[in-house]
C-alpha cells in the first residue's frame, strides 16, 4: 500500500489507527533527533573514510609494512583518532536520544493505546480473519535478555503492564526515525522490496501459506498480504508487546494475519507447512548458534519447492575492502548489537547446505528498494538503496 510520503514527526498524520501520534513538542524533539542522525550518518561519516585513507592507513603501512588486514585492525587503529571518537560519541548519542525523545511520548499514550488495541481487535460481530496467540511460558532467548538491543530500553520483549503494547508502539515510531523516513510512512519498504524480489525471482511460486520470522510489529509482514492475496500469512516473534501491537495495527488497517509468540528456532507448525518463509533484519539480532538452528527450522517448515528469502546486511566476503566492514561493525562494539560483526563472518552457503538445502538451490542477491525507486531524490537514498538477501528453494 503506497501512502503519500511524509518525513517529519511534526508533519506526520497518523498512518494507521494504532499510531502513537506525537504532540507538537514531542514531534519537534523527534524531528531534531532525526536531523541530527542524518547529519551524523550522511554528512559526517564520510570524513572517517578520508581520515582512514589519508592518515590511519599510511601510518599503519609505515609501522607494519603492510595494509590493515581486517576490520579489527582498522578499528583499533581508528579508535586512537579524535575525529573517530567524536563521531562515535555523536552516533551513540543520537541512538539514545531517539529512545529518550520517543519513549516518554509513547508512555504518555500507553493507556489509550491499550484501549485502542482492545477496541480494534474486539470481535463485536465483525468478522476478523486474523488471530493472535501468545505464550506467556515462552523462554525469551538469552541473546535478548542479556542486552538492551541497539540501546532500546527493555528490548522488544519486556512488559511494563497488563496487555502491554509499549515496545511495539515505540518501535513503530523509532524505526521511522532510524530509517530517516526512507521506509515510507508505514515502514514497510523492507517487506515491499524483499517481497517484490521474491515475486520476480520465483514468478511461478503461488504460496498457500507464508511465514515471516521475527516480525516485530508487522511492518514487513503486511506487504505479503498485498503481494500474495491468495495466501494465508503467518508471523512469529518472541516479543508479546510487539505482537499485540502488530495484531491491532493490522486489524486497524484491515489486514488478516495469524500472529503467534514463538521462537523461530523451534516452532509448533507442522513439517512442510509453508511455501514461502521470509525474514527482515532478524539474524543480526540472534546468536550465531540460533542462525544455524533457524535455517534448519526453515528447512523443516518448507514444503517441497518452497522458498526462503532472508534479508540482513551483506556478508563480508561480498565486500572486498575491509574498511567497509568497520562501518556496520560499529554497532557490535558501541550499539549493543553483539552479533552484528560475527553474523557477517558466517558462511551462509555452508549453513544452508548443512541445514539440508542443495547448494545449487541457494542464492544471494540485492533487492532494490521500492521506496527509493518511488522517491529517487530522497536524502537517505545513498544509505538504503538496496537490500542484500540470501535464501534457497527446498
Ligand atoms: C530488527 S527486528 C525485525 C524487524 C521486522 N522484521 C521488520 O521487518 O520490521 C528483530 C525481531 O526479531 C525478533 N526475534 C529475535 N530472535 C527471535 C527468535 N529466535 N524467534 C522469533 N523472533 C525473534 C525480535 O524480538 C525482534 O522483534
Image (tube, rainbow, N blue to C red):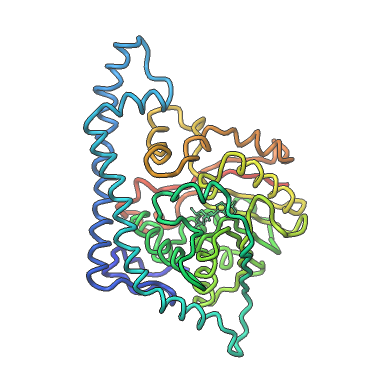
Q: What x and y, as percent, mark residue 102? A: 33, 63
Residue furthest out toward the bottom: 125
Q: What x and y, as percent, mark residue 155? A: 46, 55
Relative to residue 79, is residue 247 drawn left or right? right
Q: Is residue 234 above or below residue 290?
A: below
Residue furthest out toward the top: 65
Residue drawn at 37 percent across, 12 percent down: 66
Answer with the quarter of the image where residue 85 lies. Answer: top left
Residue drawn at 27 percent across, 26 percent down: 80
Q: How many numbered discs sit on the rendered protein? A: 0
- In this view, the residue in front, 197 or 384, is 384
Residue drawn at 55 percent across, 64 percent down: 240
Q: Is residue 81 above or below residue 273?
A: above
- In this view, the residue in front, 155 or 322, is 155
Relative to residue 20, is residue 204 drawn left or right? right
Q: Is residue 32 above or below residue 311?
A: below
Amino acid at each position: 500500500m503506497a501512502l503519500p510520503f511524509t518525513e517529519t514527526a511534526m508533519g506526520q498524520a497518523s498512518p494507521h489507527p494504532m499510531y502513537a501520534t506525537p504532540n507538537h513538542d514531542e514531534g519537534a524533539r523527534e524531528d531534531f533527533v532525526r536531523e541530527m542522525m542524518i547529519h551524523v550518518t550522511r554528512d559526517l561519516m564520510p570524513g572517517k573514510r578520508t581520515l582512514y585513507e589519508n592518515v590511519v592507513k599510511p601510518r599503519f603501512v609505515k609501522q607494519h609494512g603492510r595494509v590493515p588486514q581486517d576490520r579489527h585492525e582498522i578499528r583499533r587503529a581508528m579508535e586512537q583518532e579524535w575525529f573517530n571518537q567524536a563521531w562515535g560519541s555523536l552516533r551513540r548519542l543520537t541512538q539514545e536520544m531517539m529512545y529518550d525523545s520517543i519513549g516518554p511520548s509513547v508512555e504518555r499514550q500507553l493507556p489509550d493505546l491499550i484501549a485502542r488495541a482492545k477496541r480494534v481487535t474486539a470481535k463485536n460481530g465483525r468478522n476478523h480473519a486474523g488471530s493472535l496467540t501468545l505464550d506467556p511460558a515462552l523462554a525469551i532467548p538469552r541473546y535478548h535478555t542479556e542486552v538492551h538491543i541497539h540501546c532500546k530500553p527493555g528490548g522488544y520483549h519486556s512488559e511494563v503492564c497488563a496487555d502491554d503494547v509499549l515496545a511495539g508502539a515505540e518501535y513503530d515510531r523509532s524505526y521511522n526515525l532510524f530509517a530517516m523516513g526512507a521506509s515510507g510512512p508505514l515502514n514497510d519498504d523492507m517487506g515491499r522490496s524483499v517481497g517484490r524480489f521474491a515475486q520476480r525471482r520465483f514468478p511461478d511460486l503461488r504460496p498457500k501459506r507464508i511465514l515471516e520470522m521475527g516480525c516485530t510489529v508487522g511492518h514487513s509482514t503486511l506487504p505479503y498480504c498485498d503481494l500474495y492475496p491468495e495466501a494465508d500469512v503467518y508471523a512469529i516473534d518472541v516479543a508479546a508487546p510487539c505482537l499485540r501491537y502488530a495484531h491491532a495495527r493490522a486489524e486497524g488497517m484491515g489486514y488478516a494475519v495469524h500472529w503467534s509468540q514463538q521462537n523461530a528456532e523451534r516452532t509448533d507448525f507442522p513439517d512442510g507447512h509453508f511455501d514461502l518463509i521470509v525474514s527482515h533484519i532478524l539474524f543480526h539480532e540472534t546468536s550465531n548458534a540460533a542462525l544455524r538452528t533457524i535455517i534448519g527450522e526453515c528447512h523443516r517448515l518448507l514444503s517441497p519447492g518452497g522458498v526462503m528469502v532472508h534479508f540482513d546486511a551483506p556478508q563480508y566476503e561480498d565486500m572486498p575492502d575491509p574498511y567497509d566492514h568497520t562501518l556496520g561493525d560499529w554497532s557490535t562494539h558501541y550499539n549493543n548489537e553483539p552479533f552484528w560483526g560475527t553474523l557477517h563472518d558466517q558462511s551462509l552457503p555452508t549453513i544452508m547446505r548443512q541445514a539440508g538445502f542443495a547448494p545449487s538451490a541457494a542464492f544471494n542477491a540485492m533487492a532494490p528498494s521500492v521506496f527509493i525507486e518511488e522517491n529517487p531524490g530522497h536524502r537517505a537514498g545513498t544509505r538504503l538503496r538496496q537490500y542484500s538477501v540470501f535464501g534457497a528453494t527446498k
